[in-house]
Image (cartoon, rainbow, N blue to C red):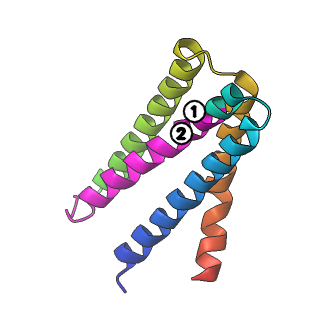
Amino acid sequence: MPVSLVSLNVARKLLFVQFLAVMASGVLFSLKDPSWGISAVGGGLAVWLPNALFMIFAWRHQAHTPAKGRVAWSFALGEVFKVVITFTLLVVALAYFKAVFLPLIVTWVLVLVVQILAPAVINNKG
């Protein structure tokens, strides 16, 4: 199987595992209060959505053969957009939707930890 397909499958699995973590955290926090559950989902989506957009961006641009040096710049630009989108989603959740801070941040950190740890588990299984 080509390397690009392997990495695409790993990225899809990672996004799926992150989505499961968001939903599980939302369900667990909703046991305390429904607003806590919604806040937890908002915090998780602040990580998951930029990652999904970055994966789509990377997948659409992998067919092109970029010139030397453009790969690093496009990756850096994608990461900057991920951070900006994440920050924007967190601000919107806290300021506009009046999300509860604790479940929002706990789920945000949980999904970030899953993003760091899951690829090692996925690569060892495959």
In the image: residue 30, left or right of residue 38? right
Structural crowding at the residue carrying mark 2, measured as other residues with C-alpha within 10 Å and reported as few (<14), some (14–19) or many (≥20): many
Residue position for label 2: 45
Residue at 38% x, 52% y is 72
On screen, residue 108 above or below 75? above
What is the x, y in percent for residue 55?
Answer: 39, 54
Nearer to us in this view, 36 or 31: 31
What is the x, y in percent for residue 57?
Answer: 31, 51
What is the x, y in percent for residue 87?
Answer: 52, 27
On screen, residue 32 above or below 125? above
Residue at 52% x, 13% y is 96
Which labelled disc corresponds to residue 9? none
What is the x, y in percent for residue 6?
Answer: 42, 76
Residue at 67% x, 25% y is 35
- Residue 47 magenta-highlighted: yes
Q: Which residues are magenta?
A: 40-67
Splitting the image into 4 quarters, where does residue 62 fall? Answer: bottom left
Type of the residue with mark 1: Gly
Q: Main secondary structure of the magenta part?
A: helix
Residue position for label 1: 42
Structural crowding at the residue carrying mark 1, measured as other residues with C-alpha within 10 Å and reported as few (<14), some (14–19) or many (≥20): many
- Residue 51 magenta-highlighted: yes
Type of the residue with mark 2: Leu
Give the quadrant of the N terminus: bottom left
Contact? badges 1 and 2 (CB < 8 Å) = yes
In the image: residue 58, left or right of residue 52? left
Give the quadrant of the C terminus: bottom right
